[in-house]
Image: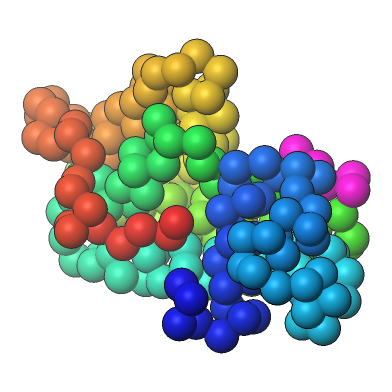
Amino acid sequence: MKTQPVREQLLEHTLVLIRRRGFNGFSYRDLAELVGVKTSSIHYYFPTKEDLVLEAVKEYSNRMGEHLRAIDTTLPVEEQAAKFLAPFRQSCGSDLICLCAMLSTEVLCLPESVHKMLQGFYERSEKWLAALLERAQSTRAKQYPVPPHQLAQVVYGALQNGLIAARLFGNTERLEAAADTLMGAVRPYGSTASDSQPETEAQSHSVS
């Protein structure tokens, strides 16, 4: 990281700090020590902490967007779902959770511009999941109990909560329960589980 420009180093460390501690869990002094610069240097690039977090959300959203776009929608729906789940499984058990989920718990401390970006992040992820569920529903003998867009919201919320709960309980049980719910929803009716195991890092695109 030392070979990166200072601005990029600051942003990379911010992505980790927010995912680990949240918006209020670190200061510019913490960031300055990690990068090896003065706090005045941070203010040069990011005048306020709100400016810094806005850039962090943009960067994180872009990385997740790249991950979703890289998933080939011509693959079997189960494979698409497994690729979607890979970053959740990679993060689960570490001390990092989704940056946007973390910031959503502190939304009252953040400016409206960040609110809108967080909302957009959730909506894009849910929209992708809803499209996947719509494709999967055509292969099933029974309809979902709720429309695909509602089921997408439920599943995505459960996945995000699973990452948070993994910290509390020290296990991946709740995240895997949410993942199994998604895999069950996209599995053709009457078939058996074909791949409930996480992908390797080489098979997926990490957003961390």
Residue 87 in view here: yes
Question: Left or right: 203 with respect to 128?
Answer: left
- Highlighted range, magenta: 105-109
Q: Residue 108: x percent and y percent?
A: 90, 45
**135, 195: nearer the viewer:** 195
Most common secondary structure along the magenta stretch: helix
Question: Left or right: 63 with respect to 197?
Answer: right
Q: Residue at x 53, y 41 (%)?
A: 97
Q: Quadrant of residue 22?
A: top right
Q: Residue at x 35, y 32 (%)?
A: 179
Question: Left or right: 154 with respect to 56?
Answer: left
Q: Residue at x 52, y 72 (%)?
A: 62
193 in the magenta segment: no
Quadrant in which the C terminus is drawn: bottom left
Tally of marks:
0
107 in the magenta segment: yes
In the rendered view, tell whether residue 14 sits above or below residue 200: below
Q: Residue at x 27, y 40 (%)?
A: 186
In the rendered view, tell whether residue 22 sits above or below residue 51: above
Residue 80 in view here: no
**16, 206: nearer the viewer:** 16
In the rendered view, tell whether residue 175 sits above or below residue 207: above
Q: Quadrant of residue 94?
A: top left
**26, 107: nearer the viewer:** 26
Q: Residue 124: x percent and y percent?
A: 55, 61
**70, 147: nearer the viewer:** 70
